[in-house]
Image: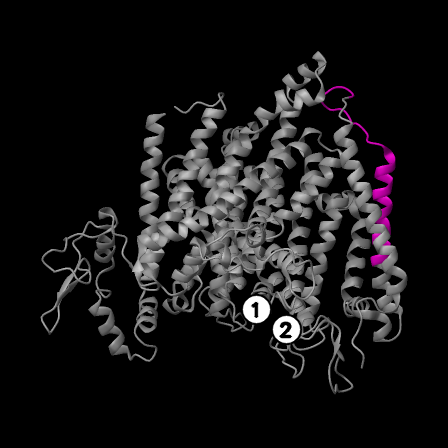
Amino acid sequence: MEPLTWTGAMGPVLIPVLVAAAALLAAGLLGQMVLSLGGMRIVQGPADAPARPAPWAGRAAMAGAALIAAAVLAFLVGGLVLPGYAAKGIIGAISLRLLPVWIALAATFALSIAFKRRLGLYGKLFDSTIGMIGFALVMFWVFTGIFGALDMVVTHDALAQVSGMKNKVPGTPLRGTEPGEYPYYLLGGDNLARDVFSRVVKGAWEVIKIAPFATLFAFMVGITLGLPAAYYGGRLDTFLSFLANLILAFPVILLFYLLVTPEIVETGIPVYMAAVLFVFPIIFFAVLFNSRFHTQPGKRAVYIGITLVIGLWLYSGIAWNADPLGLIAFPPNLLVVFVSVVFVNSPTVFRIVRGLAMDIKTRDYVAAAQTRGEGPWYIMLWEILPNARGPLIVDFCLRIGYTTILLGTLGFFGLGLSPESPDWGSTINEGRKLLTIYLHPALPPALALLSLVLGLNLLADGLREESLRD
Amino acid sequence: MGLFILRRVWVMILTALCLTFIVFFLTNLYPNLEKLAKTQGNMRMSDAEVSRWLADRGYDRNLFVKYGEWLGVVPGYVVEDDGGTVRGRCIGEGTRPEAAPRFCGVLQGDWGWSTRFRAPVAEIVATRLGLTAWLMLAVMCVMVPGALLIGVLAGMREGSKLDRTLSTASIMTTATPEYVSGVIFIAVFASSAVGLKWFKGTATSAMENITWENFTLPVLTIALYGMGYIARMTRASMAEVMTAQYIRTARLKGARFRTIVLRHALRNALIAPFTVIMLQFPWLLNGVVIVETLFNYKGFGWTLVEAAGNNDIELLLGVSVVSVFVVLVTQLISDIGYVYLNPRIRVT
């Protein structure tokens, strides 16, 4: 079989279009920048509309961007409809493998845009282009991760080594494939002859399953400690702030090198750290419901009972690996990664929450609640926290991105997850050794990580803009 | 002001003590010591041999005593083995036991002995820091002016096309960690298969002789990640200043836009980024570790990785003291500098 080309049958038509469109976009953008620099004139007042550069530059840029989008779309759709691998090309074939992801993305966007007025802040996101692009990028990787974990997108086993495929370029056909097997390595093989495409897809799941939860746990810890530090102040604040600054003064990589090693796992320190850190979500929810419903004992008993039963069950499973039902198992090397990421993130969250709460506690509605005789925890969790949600949601998105970067850093230094693991950081680390000769093993995971973090940043930016507009 | 600095210095010392103790505790856990014994002795030592090796070198004693010895507040251990030769922490090769000092810790200026490089820690840290200083200097020269320029251009007219383009660019750089941008740079500029072949993919030769070819990529890789963040902060600060009353007054007075930006807005807009730039130093350290590993430049970050990977306790402690010192001093400078730059704030 012939190796696949990148663009297949559409290449000769679409590549010139793409090049022309890129040139148009670049010229337009450059023209705009130069014109808006040169045309420094002021209309009036501080809130004036920006002085308009010549409109043709803007139009050229817009047309270029639209053309590029159309060409990329044509590649993707072409991959779905054209018959045969040779005509599809690598991009088309990948697009076909990602079909479930496209369907899920289209469904999400159609539903969200249709009901966007009823969806609160999430719906408002679809008013901002930047926010929508970010959301699309994030959801692309979320769906890819989920479907990849269900074995729908991947073409080969991410750990299987196929002889003769070592360091082969993208689009190389496999020798002697069975009828059921996928006949190509779409993004080539790495230096252990494993399929790069499948590894990137599996790596998405590694990130999707750790990063959001680790960030969520860090937020629970940060909120549970940051609110009282700001509200009570005094000794408690001094002590907690000192602890937070202590952790922040550590270079992150030194901390990782000290914490995420097999020797430390052997001592059981991660388990104790997990035992301390993972208690915070339970405390958070118990106090949350207690402060709200302490005047209604029936309701309080129900809510706190549910929190404690589910919380302690998860706690015993996750932190102590001693789930009585045997459903939850947390392998120790995953636990140490999870714990150290939570540990690194929570001081920053603590500082943000503390700063926000310091500001909000001087507001009138807090004074009103105090006059009403509400307890301190009610004020913290039901008066201060909801009013700090805007910046916290934005920071949550940014922090998931940062957590993704941290996980990549761990993988890059070969810490934590098993060496066979397909996560992006480890794959980049393996690929970098031969980087100047073979680009294809290291570049796809690098671009994947870049696009996911970029998506999260754009999403945060869109959310910030929309929440400020209220 | 004096009291403020004094209090900060006290907190700094306390933090440094806590941090070094944590590092000391973690590196002195038994599995780590066992690893050290096996890498230094031989891989197939039995448990009994490991504990004898550790006992011989004074590793098996109380953690606090060992920490005190390292710090120089507890006298160094002295043992006399079967042959009658006296060895001890403070007794180097070639010195007579009687001539050796009782205390030899950080307070006496003795940073200990690196088991990985088989050289004094102070010497290693000094040479490696020198190498990294060149890298940092180049990074600062690229990053700070670039970031300030982008931030000021973007922030001087909020919402304009220029602002949108530059802001999106800075978001992109903050979303690209060093190990991603480094890989992409090597792929584009240094790959021998495809690409432009403008620069070299390793910076090993830059340790002796810095050239345009071997130093550009590492510097760009570190600078780019920090640049976006500083640029965004500068943009926010600039945009805020541009809505201030005195800018409106200047506009109504009929001053030219260029004059307003350069003379009225710029100086006030640069106060906030100063703090941000100072607080970037700790982050740069992270970038330095990644980039030095990626480009094989054997500086401070590379030393950290080597020390941690081999559980080289005293070198690791030296490295962490230096990095903690950098973090805390930059925090102090940023606080003091902020007060000097912004006359509206007074420390009591």
Left or right of B64: which side holds A100? right
- B309 vs B66, left or right, is right
One can see residue A224 in this view: no
Q: Amino acid at mark 2?
A: Asp
In percent of width and height, residue A196 lies at 67, 71
Q: Chain of mark 1?
A: A
Same chain under badges 2 and 1? The reply is yes
Q: Between B261 and A387, which is closer to the camera in this rendering?
A: B261
Predominant SS of the magenta segment = helix
Q: Is residue A442 above or below residue A374?
A: below
Does the magenta run of residues contain A45? Answer: yes
Q: Gap between marks 2 and 1, in whole Å?
A: 9 Å
Disc tally is 2
How packed mark 1 is, by other alpha carbons closer than 10 Å (few <14, some 14-19, many 20 or more), is many
- Colouring: one colour
A71 left or right, relative to A50: right
Residue at mark 2: A190
**Which segment did they paint magenta?**
A43-72
Q: Earlier in the sequence, mark 2 or mark 1?
A: 2
- Is any atom of residue B105 visible in this view? yes
Q: Where does label 1 land, which residue?
A: A430
Q: Is residue A464 magenta?
A: no
